[in-house]
Amino acid sequence: MGTKQRLTIRISNTSLLIAVADPEASQPVEMEPFILKSGISISANMREAFKSADLLQMGYKRAQVLIDAPVLMIPTEMFNENDINALYYHSFPELKGVFVLFNVLPDLNAVAVFSISKDLKMVIEDNIPDVKYIVAMAPVWRQLHQRSFTGARQKLYGYFHDSKLDIFSFKNNRFRFCNSFNAKHSLDALYFLLYVWKQTGLDVKQDEMHLVGNIPDKDLLTEKLREYLRNAYIINPVADYNRAPATQIKGMTYDMMTLLIKGR
């Protein structure tokens, strides 16, 4: 294990994934899912993972931690670090006992404000001294923002993960739309996607919709979308990333995959 290597840990309310990338190893990317125990908190599960997960037993000193959490998006020119706690708690009053964090997204002229449970943060930092926190959507936004420059048509994106659907689009290196919806079922997703499409004034004949992630009833959803839109597509990470090792690992989320491949 090289001293410069670092773990990647992805944490949501429904899953805990641990991965490490080492291009020089016979297995360039290794991922270990930790099965969450119901009835105990995520922080308690994380504590158990540090006792039993193989990758967490290897003495890594550095980690990047992807956190799936509610996000408050602030334009860069309006961002003031002193205000983020008040703004975040006002936006998500149901959240208790969290530590507010932020990621600057310079290519999108925005700052993503998010949070982690204080208990969970303490568990991680008690075991790993050098930790970088990244909101799980950040690698996806950056990657698909770059993709939005291909061709002249406007694009709307939907990313399915953790029983949710994040919908977003870009214009002039800024978010045109960005929101998250609970969407376990394909018909719920269809409603949200078409609603946002209409709200953002996209053209059913010219513009494009691109979906990626753990899509429920993928074929049915695509078929229904194409009844309304001419250009609806499913992004294939294996092809997009030229069969990179991370794309071959079953169960790896698109955000984690993108972070490991793109490094941001």
Image (spheres, helix red, strand yellow):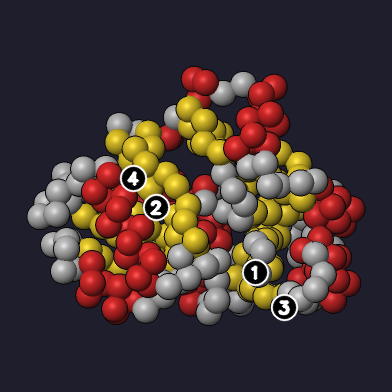
**Which of the 4 image quarters holds residue 224?**
bottom left
- Residue type at the position of mark 3: Ile
Q: How many neighbours does mark 3 have within 10 angstroms: few (below 14), some (14-19), or many (20 or more)?
A: few
The first of marks 1 and 2 along the sequence is 1
Disc 4 marks which residue? 169
Disc 2 marks which residue? 167
Q: Which residue is located at x 14 percent, y 54 percent? A: 204
Q: Is residue 10 left or right of residue 162?
A: right
- Residue type at the position of mark 2: Ile
- Residue type at the position of mark 1: Thr
Q: Is residue 162 left or right of residue 35?
A: left
Tell me residue 56's x, y (percent).
Answer: 80, 68
Q: Relative to residue 23, is residue 108 depicted above or below?
A: above
Does the rendering let one see residue 57?
Answer: no
Q: Relative to residue 85, is residue 153 depicted above or below?
A: below
Label number found at residue 35: 3
**Which of the 4 image quarters holds residue 43?**
bottom right
Q: Nearer the viewer, mark 3 or mark 1?
A: 1
Tell me residue 34's x, y (percent).
Answer: 72, 75
Looking at the image, do the residues carrying marks 4 and 2 touch, with CB atoms under 8 Å apart?
yes
